[in-house]
Image: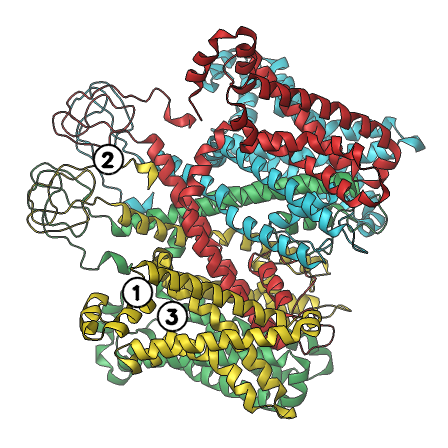
Chain colours: A red, B cyan, C yellow, D green
Amino acid sequence: MDHPADRAAEHQGDSVKERLWRIIFLADSGAARAFDVVLLWLIAGSVAVVMLESVRSVEDRHGELLHRLEWVFTLLFTIEYLLRVWTVRRKSRYVLSFFGVVDLLSILPTYLEIFMTGSGHLIVIRILRLLRMFRILKMAHHMGEANLLLRALRASRGKISVFLFGVLSIVCIEGTLMYLIESGQEDSGFTSIPQAIYWGIVTITTVGYGDIAPVTVVGKILASVMMLTGFAIIAVPTGIVSAELHRELDAVRMDTRTCRECRHAGHDPSASHCKMCGAELPESAKSEPPGHA
Amino acid sequence: MDHPADRAAEHQGDSVKERLWRIIFLADSGAARAFDVVLLWLIAGSVAVVMLESVRSVEDRHGELLHRLEWVFTLLFTIEYLLRVWTVRRKSRYVLSFFGVVDLLSILPTYLEIFMTGSGHLIVIRILRLLRMFRILKMAHHMGEANLLLRALRASRGKISVFLFGVLSIVCIEGTLMYLIESGQEDSGFTSIPQAIYWGIVTITTVGYGDIAPVTVVGKILASVMMLTGFAIIAVPTGIVSAELHRELDAVRMDTRTCRECRHAGHDPSASHCKMCGAELPESAKSEPPGHA
Amino acid sequence: MDHPADRAAEHQGDSVKERLWRIIFLADSGAARAFDVVLLWLIAGSVAVVMLESVRSVEDRHGELLHRLEWVFTLLFTIEYLLRVWTVRRKSRYVLSFFGVVDLLSILPTYLEIFMTGSGHLIVIRILRLLRMFRILKMAHHMGEANLLLRALRASRGKISVFLFGVLSIVCIEGTLMYLIESGQEDSGFTSIPQAIYWGIVTITTVGYGDIAPVTVVGKILASVMMLTGFAIIAVPTGIVSAELHRELDAVRMDTRTCRECRHAGHDPSASHCKMCGAELPESAKSEPPGHA
Amino acid sequence: MDHPADRAAEHQGDSVKERLWRIIFLADSGAARAFDVVLLWLIAGSVAVVMLESVRSVEDRHGELLHRLEWVFTLLFTIEYLLRVWTVRRKSRYVLSFFGVVDLLSILPTYLEIFMTGSGHLIVIRILRLLRMFRILKMAHHMGEANLLLRALRASRGKISVFLFGVLSIVCIEGTLMYLIESGQEDSGFTSIPQAIYWGIVTITTVGYGDIAPVTVVGKILASVMMLTGFAIIAVPTGIVSAELHRELDAVRMDTRTCRECRHAGHDPSASHCKMCGAELPESAKSEPPGHA
């Protein structure tokens, strides 16, 4: 995407459109922030309506009200979508972007319901209705703080993949063994290998529903080994993310200044003199205090 | 709040009141510490009485004794409350403070029960009785050691909020998908989207009651993906708090040397010059081995 | 194993054999990488077939298709095995190596089924079939990235063993106590000490199936203590692996400069002289920002 | 305890006794290590016998064999106990020490059973039998490697206590609220506050048996909040122990040498020259390689 400052400059000819664009796409003024807050509440409200429609007792009693609210939300999101398309300069780019598609999917299902009132389309309608739940993704627009976490997760992506693959391999082999041991038993939950692997995942992640549980002695011993394994290896993803987060936090907090006299690097951001030779340091670039990352 | 030392000075005119204030509000003498210990046991005792009153078999057999004990605790806490109000200088400030309100709520319910013996107020009385459980919060007065933990939690507050919001979004979307997949099944637990989201939270936090569990193949596959996701992202809050705790511990353990020129404290153990003014630092003591902090 | 480069040299006389060996055993050309990808998909497919054969409804409907697919996979793996034996120089070494045995076990069961069509060998056949699940281990050939994790796990092996042994001791003693408390109760799940120890492992690892749960008051108190213990000590393996991973990551990320005198690598980024011979080091590049590793 | 070397010197007059003492109490010769290994297997065997005696089907079939094995183990442990008492110099000190008491309790129950064959002592006998399970504590003699873990746990003892106390307070208040919400429902598991607190502990530790689960909407919302809280605070003990373990590992691995030229401290244990000025460093004291801590 082009830089907001450039785009602001490009829009300077059209005053109303530009002001609207600034309010909708940026967050650098009071009006823009107010717009964001109102939008967040609208999203939360519309998600709540979709949820409540699925509860039979609420739908029976307040179905009409929920239906009307749904139309209010849909109309408001339609206005928002049209405004976004109108104000943005490169329209096709926005419409085809991830958030453009999400914004369209948030309003389309309600309109499509009008045209599909035939009796045979009930399931399609239901799926369309639920698609509106994805409006929650619109919130991601507004989470600027998540960057540090996402960077740490992305940096450990490769290691977490290898870890998950390893866990799946263990679960496949242990699940197969459990199927071999338990499947002969009467009313055993281990009716097939995929079922046994499902049990293995439920167990190794320490969720433990209890809908399937070993009943033979050998099965219980093997399950115990598996649980203790899971208990020990739960440490691995934690260690990975923790180590990456440390690095991210250290990177944020580390100073890149080097002493002009002795060339010692690794100073505290608040330092004004070299801790090795006492020479004055160049001023620290980082204005942001280290405690507010 | 004003500094205890100042307040001690302000109270010097009234000898008895001042001594009582010192005993009740500070912990700098044998009597004051004895008062704290007695109070802790009284709180523990009164909380135990409220708990036991709720057990039918105990209430049937020892109801009268528990009722009397309740009045003893209430009278003692009333005396404590009156003493606090009497000895403290800025009365309104204490009464309206968090602990002032907690102290009042600890005694009020028992007195209110006398005036509400009508048959229609039973539920109100029960709630009032249970409100006394909040006496446990009075204990927080006495936990000076919790500061390090609270500082680490507060420093990671923002990141944990973003994390919890992200988890909730994932759970909302996956819960909706599970509702779509499972709700058609007979005796399925996924009767509505909120119910499916409740299941999602039970699963992603690895609690796994088992009161609701997927029964279809697609549902089980989606649940497996969700569990493995939960297993991998459980590392994120751990990594955050762990990284913040490291920082707090490191800060505590940093050099205790103070610059002779500018009195700046908090130098790196390897530093030979003050990072603030460049003056030479006294040699690092390092008598304490790093493992015995 | 001898170094790939040396082996490549040894094979230079036989052009076709050498090229095949390079494709099968190394991953340094486009053809070799394509071979690896195809093999990975074949393994995944054959594992899926074994899984689906165990699902009764699928086996009833598509049994014939699965049987044919099984033979296709077996023949392809047979060709792969023969090629490996033919191209490799030290044949006995490969055949007796871990992956040699795994490769043989992946194909043998299908052939053995032909000779054991008698009615009495059904269980043996079933076990042989499931043995093919171990084909998943063939994938380990292709995971070069797992080294860091394995190094960290190996370095913390000793500490994790001591930890697991400690957990088992706690579980044994607490399980025995629970058996003493709960075994007298009617329809108690604690029918023997091994059963109680199984419950203890299910509980301390926070799996919590719920097939066995305490029913007496004392049992519930003891179980609560055990859960909180488990909650607190789950931190120990995490801490161990996390600390080891930090070390591994730090080691990887250390300076890439090499001393011009003694060729020692692995210097501290802040070092200006070689820590081995004292020669001056080239200036640290530090072009890569620490957050983008 | 006095130093082994001193004790060895004290014993030099009595040659057989001294040699036996060395074998039993130290582990510095082949015979001593063989004695330790044999003892470990005997403990494991005797614990297995106690376990199997509690399994009805095994006791019915092999009861006589187990009884005989029990006597063999008891006699061997009696010989071991007598040898320890005979060879040790300060007898009363060993007998009253923790392991002295454990060693005595390991053999006493079997002898006491002879004198209590009356019909009324059955429960006492059963408890005595199970007391033998504590023989597992004898194994702690042989775990020298656990020191690092124990030091890290001990250093974080205070913080873990505060943490557990905080968790208990949260559980008490949330349990009381759940009792208020759920106790009115039919067939609710929340029959009393202690029961609700038990449920709270099962939930916040993510064990989740499912024997008690909320049924009302408000109860499910409150339970969801509690689970997410538990999910977030599980990070706290992990962070604490992890931070302490890091410190312990760092302490083991850190070099205390200071450069004689520039007084820079914090060198790598493998360094022979100062990384700051290139001067030669004094030889590193630590002969133990850093990777084998």
Q: Position of residue B269 (x, y in %)?
A: 24, 35
Mark whose residue sits in front, 1 or 2? 1
Label 1–label 2 contact, CB within 8 A: no
Q: Give the CA separation, mark 2 to mark 3.
A: 51 Å
Residue labelled with disc 1: C26
Label 2–label 3 contact, CB within 8 A: no
For the point 17% across and 20% down, which residue is it? A280
Disc 3 sits on a residue from what chain?
A: D
Mark whose residue sits in front, 3 or 1? 1
Disc 2 sits on a residue from what chain?
A: C
Mark 2, Cα crowd under 10 Å, few <14 / some 14-19 / many 20+, is few
Residue labelled with disc 3: D142
Residues B28 and B152: in front is B152
Residues B41 and A6: in front is A6
Q: Position of residue B193 (x, y in %)?
A: 73, 42
Q: Is residue B101 left or right of residue B263?
A: right
Mark 1, Cα crowd under 10 Å, few <14 / some 14-19 / many 20+, is some
Q: Secondary structure at mark 2?
A: loop
Q: Amino acid at mark 1?
A: Leu
Task: Examine the rendered structure and indicate whether residue D92 appears above or below residue B275.
Answer: below
Task: Examine the rendered structure and indicate whether residue C46 appears above or below residue D79.
Answer: above
Q: Secondary structure at mark 1?
A: loop
Mark sitting earlier along the chain (1/2): 1
Residue labelled with disc 2: C287
Mark whose residue sits in front, 2 or 3? 2
Work out whether disc 3 and disc 1 sit on a shared chain: no
For the point 36% across and 60% down, which residue is it? C33
Q: Amino acid at mark 3?
A: His
Q: Amino acid at mark 2?
A: Ser
